[in-house]
Image (tube, rainbow, N blue to C red):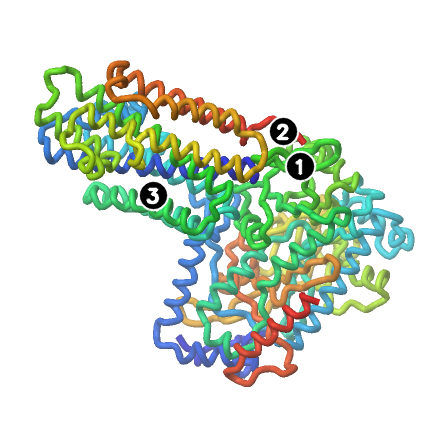
Amino acid sequence: MLSRVADSLFWISRYIERAENTARIIDVNLNLLLDLPGEERLFEPVIKTAGCSRSFYNKYSKATSENVMDFLTFDTDNQDSIVNCVSFARENARCIRETITLEMWMLINKFYHRLHEPNIKEEMLNNPHDFFTEIKEFCQLYVGIQDGTMSHGIGWNFAWLGRMLERADQTSRILDVKYYILLPDVSMVGMTLDTVQWTAVLKSVSAFEMFRKTYAGVTPQNVAEFLILNKEFPRSVYYCLEHSERALQNIITHQKTINGEKSMRVIGKLKAMLEFATVDEIIMKGLHETTEDIQIRLSDFNATIRNDFIDCTWQV
Amino acid sequence: MRFETYKTEGFYDELFFENGEPRPCAEPLIETINELPDGELQRRQKTAEASFMDTGITFAVYGNKDGSEKIIPFDVIPRIVDAKTWENLEKGLKQRTHALNCFLNDIYGEQKILRDKVVPDTLVNTCTAFRKECMGLVPPRKIWAHITGTDLVRDKDGTFYVLEDNMRCPSGVSYVLQNRRILKQTFPKVFSKCAIRPVDEYPAKLRAMLEYLASNTDNPKAVVLTPGVYNSAYFEHSFLSQQMGIELVSGSDLIVIDKKVYEKTTQGLVQVHVIYRRIDDEFLDPLTFRKDSLLGVPGLFEAYKAGNVALANAPGCGAADDKAIYTYVPDIIKYYLGEENIIPNVPTFVCEDPVKRNHVLSNLDKMVVKAVSESGGYGMLVGPHATEKEREEFKEKIKANPRNYIAQPMISLSRVPSITENGFEGRHVDLRPYIVQGEDIYVIPGGLTRVALKKGSVVVNSSQGGGGKDTWVIAPDKGAPEQGQGLQYMQHQQQQQQQERRK
């Protein structure tokens, strides 16, 4: 497979996964606003999670829900806004139009035009829940169509790898930022507000229902354990790492060449770090330090993949 | 919408006789449309347009910043060509393409035709598309013009003329295939009544031609080379590569090592044998042609010269579609094939000739003037529709650089009924069939019918507000279907084709 094409498939997945996560976080926090009237700081962590505090506060003085919604959804100056994610995904899809299936292309193309409809902003403000649900459903539909219409060969595995990598990154970020904001003071542990907020964290990665089936109480430890170490939940960091590794293994098997060994080593080490860890150890070491470590290593992994498959030193 | 009040207004109409009766080949269509309930045809037209938008069959118009993408306007009323007319056109197109290929082999080789003074050598030497770098070069299988799009027009009396030859990556064939797909959805019943010749074979023919060029390998790898997503024809590049099942690459995906071309893949380098390039000559290789080109592949031309890669079309083949050389095509056909040309040229005045130039300058209000090196409807003057000031300006341009201009009398282009706000009205059309020259010459049955959708306009280029129509070529009468048996007939035909392929 052409390196450029593999790269595009990888990034389409990342962009769409990113758009889905952003939509999810906004939606959950809008809901939370109804439970916690008067809470003004609710959207600050959202901006932090997205990693765009600086550009946001350059534009706005206050993180009101409206400002945040607009910034994260429609602002083209914000690299990671939903509109940009969908545009970049479409741009990439256009470049590899002949590789992806017609159904995948049509979905992205239609949704791109949908987000550029003239009254779309008013639609969002009038009925945000429906609007963000539509975005989530588009992203899920894309994953489904990709799985159901595209051959699961090298290209598809690159797409899968991109999705898993992005998801691991997003989950670790959400956890990091929320933990930081929510536990400024140990005495707050177990208070009602706390529970409501931690539930929101779970909902941000749509983990609440699955969490409930495993744990009785919503405590910070339980949430951290579930979102980092759970081996079955599809948005836990560990799960995403394991599946990144599988995707990578598939690529290597399909290709019958040796490149990819370095990437395999990087992801293997990271996975092993979490495989035998306990949540107490993680909290002892510091949750923030752990998630930061994960993010750095994920970015290393990303670079190694590039090195191994995309910008490889070309040999005949 | 009905055809009851439709008028041909003195033009040649592709679907109707002057007296308002439909031509025999158009009868089933007209009947079907007349029977549709009110508003149904408009609804189908809308559905067709939406289908173009959703599938992203869009076209980028250069210099248009706000709406960087538009759908090509599409009109669901097809243009229909009867079997006999087509048979003659097909013969003529094959003849012309063959002769022009001989011409290219000659002018880059021995130049006999110039020495025999059939074509003036000054014309070739001053032709901007003539590539000195290609002198003495013999392309794989001696084919230069692999893909040709020949523009045909039909005059008041129904005679077809060749308006121009396009050998420099002519675009539009993807619209032919898409238009057909959409019309099958729009008028399924008519398809089952008429024996309309299918066009879907084109990608397979194209791929077979490309692979035929790689004579020194059993396992040829062919790719489509695109300038990228911002090119106005990008959709077509990607569509064709998908339909052919070969990879679409951009210049940066390729690398030349030791005069061999490779593509960069996740597995390392893989050799490429044939490139269907949709990049102009000048941009192909910064080491040989334009140095500032970022679209091309450094060293590609050397690899081509060494015979390690085939390029379709061959660099330098634009010399044969120069609008001034066009006037000599009948002579070229006679010279190489010893035949009279089957489809005539539009009478053309080469402005370089002082006598003809004066004639042009004093009759500018009756002529269409074109810059020989431009395409896409740019750099042209439609004399009868231009203002006095525009004509004066053009006179100066012609005087300043006569070699750059040709002029033709205004042809009264034939028309096809089209949907307008006021019901059906005739709109002027041309026709661009696509010709693939490989082991043999294949002409797509039909081609792109371009239509000037503005009332009275004769400029059909999509960059100038033109649109498209499907083109139906009716199968020859041998065992032609009775009404209602079209489907069986087509199935029968397809089976025959398959059997032939197996042979």
Same chain for the residues under marks 3 and 1 in the image? no
Which residue, given by chain and number where applicable, does mark 3 sit on?
A139
In front: A157, or B74?
A: A157
Residues marked 1 and 2 touching at CB (< 8 Å): yes
Chain containing mark 1: B
Q: Position of residue B243 (x, y in %)?
A: 56, 55
User: Gap in Å between the C-alphas at discs 3 and 1?
Assistant: 36 Å
Q: Which mark is residue B51?
A: none
Amino acid type indicated by mark 2: Trp
Chain-order first, disc 3 or disc 2:
3
Which residue, given by chain and number where applicable, does mark 1 sit on?
B262
Quarter occupied by residue B95:
bottom right
Which residue, given by chain and number where applicable, does mark 2 sit on?
A314
Residue extending furthest toward the right: B116
In front: A115, or B242?
A: B242
In the rendered view, does A191 fall on the left or right side of B364? left
Residue at 79% from the left image edge and 60% from the top image edge: B99
Asked whether residue A77 appears in the rendered view, the answer is: no
User: Gap in Å between the C-alphas at discs 3 and 2?
Assistant: 35 Å
Quarter occupied by residue B225:
top right
Q: Nearer the viewer, mark 3 or mark 2?
A: 2
Please tell me whether mark 1 sits on a helix, a strand or a loop.
Answer: strand
Amino acid type indicated by mark 3: Cys
Asked whether residue A9 appears in the rendered view, the answer is: yes
Residues marked 3 and 1 touching at CB (< 8 Å): no
Q: Position of residue B67 (x, y in %)?
A: 43, 45
Quadrant of the rendering where the N terminus of chain B is positioned: bottom left
Q: Position of residue B274 (x, y in %)?
A: 69, 46
From what the image shows, is residue B346 above or below residue A160?
Answer: below
Please tell me whether mark 2 sits on a helix, a strand or a loop.
Answer: loop
Residue at 58% from the left image edge and 56% from the top image edge: B172
Chain containing mark 2: A
